[in-house]
Image (cartoon, rainbow, N blue to C red):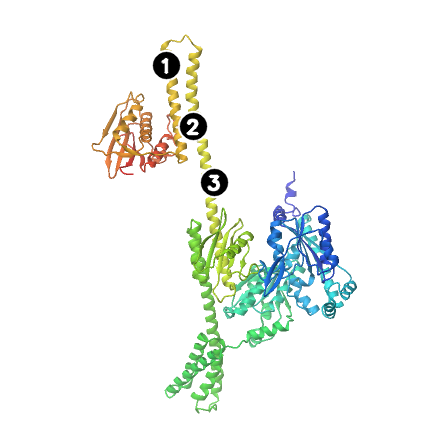
Amino acid sequence: MPSETNKNDPRRPDPETFLKIAKSEEAYSSKGKLKIFLGYSAGVGKTYAMLEAARRIKNDGVDIVIGYVETHKRVETQALVEGLEVIPRKNLSYRGTVLPEMDLDVVIERKPKIAVVDELAHSNAPGSRHVKRFQDIEELLAEGIDVYTTLNIQHLESLNDVVAKVTGVSMHETVPDRILDDAREIEVVDIPIGDLLKRLREGRVYISEAAERALQNFFNESNLTALRELTLRRAAKRIDTQMQGFLRRRITGGPLPVGERLLVCISSYPSSSELVRAGRLLAAGLDAEWFAVYVETPGEANLSVEKKEQLAKTLKLAEELGAKVATVTDQTPADGVIHYARRHNATKILIGKPLKRRLKDVLAGTVVDQLIRKSGEIDVYVINRSSRESGKKETAAEFQPLSWGVYLKSLFLVAVASGLGILTRQYLEPTNLVMFYLLAVVTSAIFLGRGPSIFASIASVLAFDFLLVPPFYTFVVNDAQYLVTFIMFFVVALIISTLTIRTKEQAESARSREAHTASLYELSRDLASAREKQTVFQALLKHIKESLGASVAVFSLEKDGLKLSLKTESFPFNDHESAVADWTLKNGQPAGKGTDTLPGTAGYYIPFKTRRKVYGTLGIVLKEKAVRLHIEDKRLLESFSGQTAIALERIDLSEEAEKSRFLEEREKLQSALFNSISHDLRTPLVSITGSLSGMRENLKMSEEARKELLDNAYEEADRLNRLMGNLLDMARLEANAMKVSPHPCEIRDVVGSSLKELEERLSDRKVTVEIEPNIPHIPMDFSLMMKVLVNLIDNAVKYAPFGLPIDIQAKKTEGNIEIKILDRGLGIPPSDLEPIFDKFYRVKRPENFEGTGLGLSICKGIVEAHQGKIWAENRPGGGAIATVSLPIKT
């Protein structure tokens, strides 16, 4: 047994850490395992090595198939394919050309142990389920299929800029680094550079003409040397990472040091992708968790469509490379970055070097300068954005000219101000006339934008000097003090226009956030009160229509699969859209328009997903001109789907709790039934057995003693018969098998027959029957209703003291006949008046009355089957009243 000292030893491994590791390994074991044959260039023999490994695995008896292999018509490679099962390719037609691709569905349906899929970085033909082949491989892995694949180092996303600098070629087909990081095994396929160049010259990689072009461009010795170094470095880094992971799981010598946290600042410009890739490499080198953060300032609240698209691409790239992505709002980019960095304990900040300095940067400093001033203990890394093309695009985007129409409108406002000034200049001082122009500047800022307001400021100074300052109609001034007036007027006009525009942008941003917040609040309020799935879906559909104005469809997971629960009239529901919704449900990932999975569909689909399960799919069809969801709309939709998933989970848990409660109640009833029946069956059986054994053992017993034993046995047998009858009646009621055959009957006959059946039990009682005259015949099942009255009268006899009378009354009320059984017994405690008709319920009394607690429950079931009511109440002066109310017409 470990001592207390050992328990508190800081070197002792944390049990929570081992638990997390166990859970991650369990989740990892359910997925397929990926093996990547990594090379530094085409022609090093990756496919050949992969097929050799496949043949060895095949010879060991492992089920392995070829999903897709590109042999490039090389004889030695084609020879390795022979003898291996090859899945037929799927032919897709695109612009008159037939393009063969891997048939993903057939491979999944075949479900081999291992699938060989060549060219990890390949882009699929239009019409495929996924845009990229690595997404096909991810789906195979999710299905539990192991995959062998090949990759060249230059197709790794984080190395895209490095490769472009080294080789001068930018790779368009790239693979996220997480694919390589998550691979179970990496096999580096390497040959000397001289051997590779020899292969190229011999035409064993490309045909002769293509080989010559390759040797002159990409495949020169310096490029290949650099790529080979990158490959070996990455493989070494992989081994180092695996060793660190092993030490983390096995370390017992003390806690691991706290890791670094890197924050990458991104913007809506194309060069931000370089920052993201550089951030990924730096984070990998530091073994750091990293974040990609975009700060939305008031001036950037209304980005152009192009900038929004570029920002969405950059954020998506950061997510693919493993970053935690966030969009925050603040007054300046520097403030937003610093606030986020401090909240998330970032230790380093990565930002790009400004392409050029603007006037406001000279006055207030660039974003980099502000970050360095405010960063404190946080390190700031500044990298150079080397892409000239990106710089040109950013400059063009930043100074995109506006329409001349807004400038003409601004000039018109200045002209109106000038006209007012000319009309009033003989009554007002020039310094007061300036207000007309300030009004024109503010109006331009509010309604026309930043550029027209600056133009209005300049035009206002010139017009004020030319038209309103003596001498008129010339730019010459008599008083030099007016020069100060002009300068101050221009500065004030610029400041007012800037503040007005900033206030307008802040108000628009606040309105947008407020609208989204209000939508989320209203949806959460509606979902909180929803008790059924359909109500949840109706609330969701209503709020999406109001917030986005899009066509909506809601798919719910039912016992027999995914079903369309609700949709707007304009949603284009068909088999193809339904298949995309089903894929989203099974994989728990967004798909459809604007994504890399089935992008050719009309709708964008997102799952209702919680940690427990996926409950359904939400489909959105955007307005006709919209290409994809904007970032803020996508965030709103994700929040909507998340809240809906939580509401569905709550309903699901509530139903499970209700089932559990029902099962618990059923177990209690079964236990009570077992206890009650075992006692009530045993008692008469013991009595009957005792009477019969007494007569059997004493044959010379007197006739009087024999008769007494026989009477006792008969009474107990009758009691046992009633008990079995009650049990059978209750079973029929529970199974809805009790058939009611109503016929017009007279109440007097039912009461009389019931009393006759209980004649012996009532021999020592005075029974008074009062039936109101002229009571009509009412439809009832005579035998069943007789059982009700027999049970009620028998109860009155059981609980009323010996010799006290029992009264039976029947009278007509509004549309009903009421039959009352009245006794002068102990009465019923008020708290038991309602549950007394429940199964197995018995009033707790000091006296131990026999019974199972089924009689009144059977009475209630029979009466309700007649559309009637039954209740109990205490009788004034002592005793109880049981009332049966039956409708005259049923």
Residue that mark 3 sits on: 660
* Lower position in the chain sequence, tag 3 or tag 2: 3
Residue 226's place in the image compared with 744, above or below, is: below
Element assignment for label 1: helix
Residue 859's place in the image compared with 427, above or below, is: above
Camera-nearest label, 1 or 2: 1
Residue 169's place in the image compared with 179, above or below, is: below
Q: Which of 793 and 14 is in front in this view?
A: 793
**Residue 426: x %, y % from top left:** 37, 88
Element assignment for label 3: helix
**Circle 1/circle 3 CB separation < 8 Å:** no
* Lower position in the chain sequence, tag 1 or tag 2: 2
Q: Which residue is drawn at 40% across and 29% down?
A: 727
Q: Residues within 10 Å of mark 2 (few under 14, many from 20)?
A: some
Q: Which of 119 and 353 is in front in this view?
A: 119
Q: How crowded is mark 3: few (under 14 residues within 10 Å), some or many (20 or more)?
A: few
**Residue 8: x %, y % from top left:** 63, 45
**Residue at the extreme left:** 773
Name the amino acid type tagged 2: Ser
Measure the alpha-carbon separation of dots 1 and 3: 51 Å
Measure the alpha-carbon separation of dots 3 and 2: 24 Å
Question: Which quadrant of the view contains residue 398?
Answer: bottom right
Residue that mark 2 sits on: 676
Q: Is residue 747 visible?
A: yes
Q: Can residue 377 be seen in this view?
A: no
Residue that mark 1 sits on: 708
Question: Which quadrant of the view contains residue 672?
Answer: top left
